[in-house]
Amino acid sequence: MYDRFVKDRIQEALTDTRVVLISGPRQSGKTTLATDIAADDIPFFTLDDATVMTAATEDPVGFLRGLERAVIDEIQRAPELLLSIKAEVDKDKSPGRFLLTGSANLMTVPKVADSLAGRMEVVKLLPLSRSEIQGAKSTFLDNAFNGAAPTVETTIIGDDLIEMVLAGGYPEALDRRRWARRQDWYHGYVDALVQRDVRDIAQIEQLAIMPKLLSILAEHSGQLVNYSGVGGAISLNHVTTQKYVRVFESLFIVQTLQPWFTNKLKRLTKSPKLHFLDAGLLAALRDISPDVVRKDKTSFGAILETFVFSELQKIATWNEQRFSFSHFRDKDKNEVDVVIENRRGEVVGVEVKSSATVSAGDFSGIRRLAEACGDRFVQGIVLYDHDQVVPFAENMRAVPLSCLWSSK
């Protein structure tokens, strides 16, 4: 079993917060982590069990009565239970009463968000990061916001990098050594997701169209979102397409990355970018294998950008600081793939290149971002397929992709 670095944060939250929710995509390891935390000390209930599900939905008050503490797995299957949990923790405000897991973002449901405001902390658990696979916490974000040069520890480049990126981070997929077997797992995952989780959280009139929509979204990963263009291929209007995309967002399959904004620049794009949250799932949906990339690397850039975006999101879940993520693009098409901002308003720009070389021109978007940020700009980083950190200016560097999982 892999060590999950958010475990310390969850255990600390249980010492001062009444309800803690581990939220993330199905098969990311939530149940395993919750079971590990509960050990033999806390009763464990899963709503995947038909008997438990019946008890929780038909008599939620009776189900919770007498439980001083409990772990409830897959809470999105019975969101009405949360109102009874609210009543329970309002009667007994002791911390750590309920540890929940959910494969859907319940905080997008207004009644849920309102009912547990101030009572629940949400901790996101995404598929495995490269740091967790290697067993050492990444210091990438800390170094970036300290203005320090990122460090290189375990270097992965070339064909090895391609293999690693396309593997993704879902534990069960990683256990399969052959690409064809991993691809089978990912396609089975999508089928189960649509038939079960989509049904659980949304009223979808055209359920059969969802796998096709997900495949189309895979072709647009890393691009600006055009809902009319995406939906048009399967005869969906932009309103319905946006609604269905939000369902996939709530299931932590895709994420729309909002544009960075400042009043200093009036000519910025207002369109979000679309990203998948796992590069392995994206590669499987696009039928891109290591052999395909070795013959033609054209398709690798978008998947690599998804991988970097996902790794940054994962590192942020266990970091002491809190970060917001966006993208930058002006009307002259100067762009930065990922803009990271901390609560002090400091900004780091990250650009992703699949090549082994970087030129001054690759920093054009970062330079424009730096001008707009002024003193708030800390550092600009171009990640590339190499093993050397190369300075291009006082606060701009070409940095190996391997720095993402360095612990120094």
Image (cartoon, helix red, strand yellow):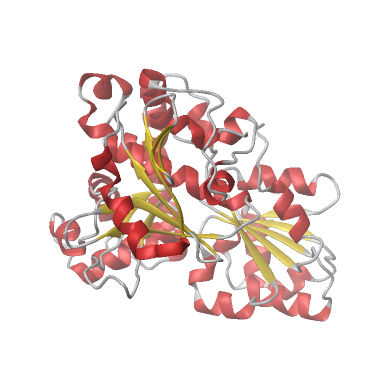
The image position of residue 67, as x and y in percent, is 82, 65
- At x 54%, y 51%, the residue is 145
Query: Quarter of the image containing the N terminus?
Result: top right
The image quadrant of residue 5 is top right
- At x 64%, y 31%, the residue is 135
Residue 136 shown left or right of residue 13 in the figure? left
Q: Is residue 32 above or below residue 333?
A: above
Looking at the image, can residue 336 be seen?
Answer: no
The image position of residue 296, as x and y in percent, is 20, 24
Looking at the image, can residue 105 be seen?
Answer: yes
The image position of residue 36, as x and y in percent, is 74, 43
The image quadrant of residue 209 is bottom left
- At x 50%, y 37%, the residue is 404
Query: Quarter of the image containing the C terminus?
Result: top right
Q: Is residue 57 above or below residue 223?
A: below
User: Number of marks in the image?
Assistant: 0
Residue 354 shown left or right of residue 127 in the figure? left
